[in-house]
RNA sequence: GCCGAAGUGGCGAAAUGGCAGACGCGGAGCACUCAAAAUGCUUUUCCGAAAGGAGUGCGGGUUCAAGUCCCGCCUUCGGCACCA
């Protein structure tokens, strides 16, 4: 039943349908128009993977990104807030295989769906700046990037033991192996010797680590520490050990050169080339032992290898190294606890002061010699290596020194003798970028029997992916592109003889490592991005996305940025000035997943509560970096609040442009207190508190309309307009409709919040509190300009205070006029 | 093991060293209604009838005053981890 006198009902779905087409025309978020001289800001949300329709996680990320973007638009900035799709990759390929379709169709269908959902979700994207990484117009520049790296010597091929996912049938970067499992499919990752393409990220290890300091305070400290951990720099020394029966010495890396006198044996990684060589020159029995051991090592996977309680195993090669400081002959052993690809694949073992070496020594009956007196029990007795600080003993010239001095002295001794040098090592490995899959950017290299690796000339780019039709995409260990014979067989760009294209595709993290620059000119066919635009807009002022990318994506993007800087394409060294990591949306305590059966469908939430209520809930649930448990929050409560705000605007009866200065004092004060507090809260990412402040203002507004002031009071209009503008960051449909109800033209998103009139906030009196021994005992109203003496006197007169003091005597009285008195007794 | 973050009502959460629990969810009550829904208002940390007392993971400390700063624990979460 409709009530004729009160026909205005808040109908969120009607409002959504009403405003969408109007906004399509209005385009309030177009950026970089000719003659637009608003100051520039670049706000970027991590672009989605088109694996289906948008889900709750996207809804949170884009709600929060939008608060920031819309805030700066409202502040009068020319905000670039683009969107794109990270659309190459395995899920599309796997879905295609499963359904017998082309990955392209699946991908672009999903993109269309997500795009429509983003429009409905009222994302403030600039729809003129859109990119899709699987478009040739994008990946052509991915190939350009590869060739720039190649020409600079930063892209190279090598054969080594790589991470291999037996289920995806492709190699994986180190970063894509999580706890020994494939990050995509959770299969146990194995090792395989393959020739693969790498980017030389290790050349930038120092800068990637040191420049993290410049992000301090602007990136979550968690992400900074994760990156530091991942790069893992350690300082120490390279030490050369002569090997009996070998011309070349073997170099080992150690962080504890001070303990060199305690090195009682050497351990070589069982799966290293050095181990094979050393074993080859022993007797038949040892060779046999080594071969059997190596076989066992190769069969164990990372999961087994990483088990902490795993007993140490190894084989004594019966060969000897010479300790460079004391000439001692020490046995050489092989074991799998030494890694082939860290340091030099060989270590000096100091069992007394390293627990791993100790366990190994115990297991194989090797000598243990204490060279640092830490004041703890002898490791031979306690069974625990002493790894801490102490005084050097049994160490010749080092005796009596502390750890730090001993390290320095040992290094200078080694350097003087030419037996070693100070150095550092990184945990970070080079980035393996080739993949044996179809749906990715083809690597723009031709292999020629006479010329070797030949880069495809820039004017022949893009090397377009051949049609998937007729190709067998099923994982089989080699790239499906190998089956596209017309595509593979080309003539060498250099000599013209028959040659073959490289059939691998690039890791999709290459695509996303520079996409933020492509938004500057997403449709350009002549350059990856214009230098001048990069100067004007980049780096990204505010990046928003999940912490899941804390290592991989952010590290790669930082690396590529530094390379592009060194190649003189850009003048900055860090891509993302400020970073916000939003939390995850959980359901009943755990991440949403099909197997748990706890998936909340975004579309259902939107159909039930409306876009605005879902967006508002995302912002109001808590601090943005915390997880949101959907079971704990109330989208219906948000909807209720929005209706309440909308009704208040609907109640306003004064004319547009009514001068607020004659309005209700109390409500004006509430409005201007809000105006003072709101901006800093948003800029400090305290969106939940910002929403709470809007709620307070709506409560005050309601009270004023229903109370003495009445609906026609000018302050009521001022408050309602303030609510509409502020609310547009969180609930754009409701805010726009309120704005219209208040008599304005569409475009609340561009309506600026005025500065607070602080003169309205000056109080003549305040509530003073009186504490006795820090406990609240009384409060009363006092003039703001009350003197300390007068306030003290008032406090001491209070009955409640007298009672609290009792028969104790006063030791001290602290007065902070006009707000506080604290009486300390003794 | 190493590094980091966090522990506050029934729940999500607020709180420049200065009134702990803003704002909301949920609960209770009142008004409107024949009734319900919706809406508006009141109330809601715990114990206590009240006066009052207790209270921010635990134990200490600094301070007139500590959720906040310092020291030591406990628990949870995240990252790294046989990296020499």
Image (tube, coloured by chain):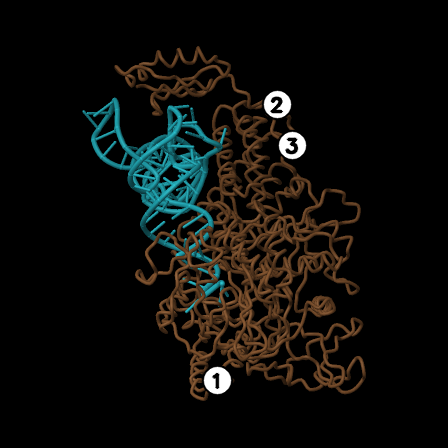
What residue does disc 3 label? A656
Position of residue A538 measured from the top left corner of the image (x, y, whole percent): 70, 51
Q: Mark 2 lies on which chain?
A: A
Which of the two labelled residues, at mark 1 and mark 3, occupies the earlier sequence position?
A: 1
Which of the two labelled residues, at mark 1 and mark 2, occupies the earlier sequence position?
A: 1
Position of residue A422 measured from the top left corner of the image (x, y, whole percent): 58, 59
Left or right: where does residue A783 sit relative to residue A313?
A: right
Q: Colour of chain B?
A: cyan
What residue does disc 2 label? A661
In the rendered structure, are the residues bearing label 1 and label 2 in contact, judged by CB atoms less than 8 Å apart? no
Name the element at disc 3.
loop
Residue for point 42% across, 62% down: A354
Rounded to the nearest whole Å, what is the CA distance between mark 1 and mark 2? 97 Å
Which quarter of the figure has residue A509? bottom right
What residue does disc 1 label? A282
Instruction: Identify whether A672 is placed above or below A605.
Output: above
Name the element at disc 2.
helix
* Numbered marks: total: 3
Q: Mark 3 lies on which chain?
A: A
Residue most extreme to the bottom = A284
Q: Which of marks 2 and 3 is in front?
A: 2
């Amino acid at each position: 039943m409709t009530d004729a006198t009160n026909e205005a009902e808040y109908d969120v779905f009607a409002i959504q349908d009403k405003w969408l087409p109007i906004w399509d025309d209005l385009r309030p978020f177009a950026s970089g128009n000719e003659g637009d001289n608003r100051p520039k800001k670049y706000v970027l949300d991590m672009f989605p993977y088109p694996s289906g329709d948008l889900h709750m996680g996207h809804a949170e990320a884009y709600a929060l990104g939008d608060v920031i973007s819309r805030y700066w638009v409202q502040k009068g900035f020319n905000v670039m807030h683009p969107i794109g799709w990270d659309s190459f990759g395995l899920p599309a390929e796997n879905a295609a295989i499963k359904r017998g379709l082309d990955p392209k169709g699946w991908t672009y269908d999903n993109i269309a769906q997500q795009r429509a959902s983003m429009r409905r979700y009222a994302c403030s994207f600039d729809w003129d700046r859109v990119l899709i990484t699987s478009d040739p117009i994008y990946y052509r520049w991915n190939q350009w990037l590869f060739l720039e790296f190649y020409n600079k010597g930063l892209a190279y091929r090598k054969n080594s033991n790589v991470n291999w996912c037996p289920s995806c049938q492709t190699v994986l970067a180190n970063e894509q192996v999580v706890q020994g499992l494939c990050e995509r499919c959770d299969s146990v990752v194995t090792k395989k010797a393959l020739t693969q393409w790498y980017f030389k990220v290790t050349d930038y290890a120092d800068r990637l680590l040191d420049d993290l300091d410049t992000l301090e305070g602007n990136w979550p400290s968690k992400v900074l520490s994760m990156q530091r951990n991942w790069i893992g720099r350690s300082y120490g020394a390279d030490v050369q050990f002569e090997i009996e029966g070998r011309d070349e010495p073997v170099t080992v890396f150690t962080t504890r050169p001070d303990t060199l006198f305690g090195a009682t044996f050497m351990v070589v990684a069982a799966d290293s080339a050095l181990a094979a060589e050393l074993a080859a020159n022993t007797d038949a029995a040892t060779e046999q032992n080594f071969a059997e051991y190596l076989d066992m090592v190769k069969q164990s996977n990372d999961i087994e290898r990483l088990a902490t309680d795993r007993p140490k195993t190894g084989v004594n090669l019966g060969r000897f190294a010479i300790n460079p400081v004391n000439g001692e002959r020490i046995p050489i052993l092989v074991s799998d606890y030494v890694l082939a690809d860290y340091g030099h694949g060989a270590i000096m073992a100091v069992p007394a002061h390293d627990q791993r070496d100790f366990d190994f020594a115990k297991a194989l009956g090797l000598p243990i010699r204490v060279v640092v007196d830490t004041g703890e029990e002898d490791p031979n007795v306690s069974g625990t290596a002493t790894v801490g600080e102490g005084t050097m003993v049994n160490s010749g010239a080092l005796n009596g020194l502390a750890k730090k001095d001993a390290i320095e002295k040992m290094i200078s001794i080694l350097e003087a003798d030419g037996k070693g040098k100070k150095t550092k090592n990184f945990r970070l490995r080079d980035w393996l970028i080739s993949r044996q899959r179809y749906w990715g950017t083809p690597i723009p290299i031709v292999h020629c029997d006479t010329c070797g690796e030949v880069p495809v000339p820039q004017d022949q780019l893009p090397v377009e992916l051949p049609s998937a039709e007729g190709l067998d995409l099923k994982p089989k260990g080699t790239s499906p592109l190998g089956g596209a014979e017309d595509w593979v067989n080309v003539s060498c760009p250099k000599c013209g003889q028959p040659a073959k294209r490289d059939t691998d595709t690039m890791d999709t993290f290459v695509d996303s490592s520079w996409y933020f620059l492509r938004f500057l000119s997403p449709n350009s066919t002549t350059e990856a991005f214009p230098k001048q635009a990069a100067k004007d807009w980049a780096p990204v002022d505010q990046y928003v996305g999940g912490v899941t990318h804390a290592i991989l994506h952010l590290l790669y993007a930082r690396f590529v940025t530094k390379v592009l800087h060194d190649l003189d394409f850009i003048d900055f060294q860090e891509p993302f000035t400020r970073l916000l990591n939003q939390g995850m949306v959980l359901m009943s305590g755990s991440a949403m997943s099909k197997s748990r059966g706890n998936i909340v469908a975004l579309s259902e939430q939107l159909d039930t509560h409306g876009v605005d209520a879902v967006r508002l809930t995302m912002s109001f649930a808590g601090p943005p970096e915390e997880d949101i448990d959907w079971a704990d929050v109330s989208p219906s409560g948000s909807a209720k609040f929005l209706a309440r705000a909308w009704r208040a605007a609907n109640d306003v009866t004064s004319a547009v442009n009514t001068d607020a200065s004659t309005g209700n004092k109390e409500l004006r004060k509430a409005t201007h207190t809000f105006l003072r507090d709101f901006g800093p809260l948003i800029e400090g990412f305290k969106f939940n508190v910002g929403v709470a402040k809007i709620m307070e203002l709506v409560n005050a507004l309601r009270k004023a309309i229903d109370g003495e002031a009445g609906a026609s009071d000018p302050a009521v209009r001022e408050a309602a307009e303030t609510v509409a503008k502020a609310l547009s960051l969180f609930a754009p449909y409701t805010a726009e409709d309120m704005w219209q109800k208040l008599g304005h033209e569409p475009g609340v998103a561009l309506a600026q919040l005025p500065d607070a009139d602080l003169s309205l906030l000056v109080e003549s009196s305040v509530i003073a509190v009186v504490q006795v021994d820090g406990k609240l005992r009384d409060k009363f109203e006092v003039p703001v300009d009350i003197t300390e003496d007068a306030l003290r006197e008032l406090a001491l007169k209070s009955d409640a205070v007298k009672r609290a003091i009792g028969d104790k005597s006063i030791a001290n009285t602290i007065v902070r006029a006009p707000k506080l008195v604290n009486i300390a007794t003794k």
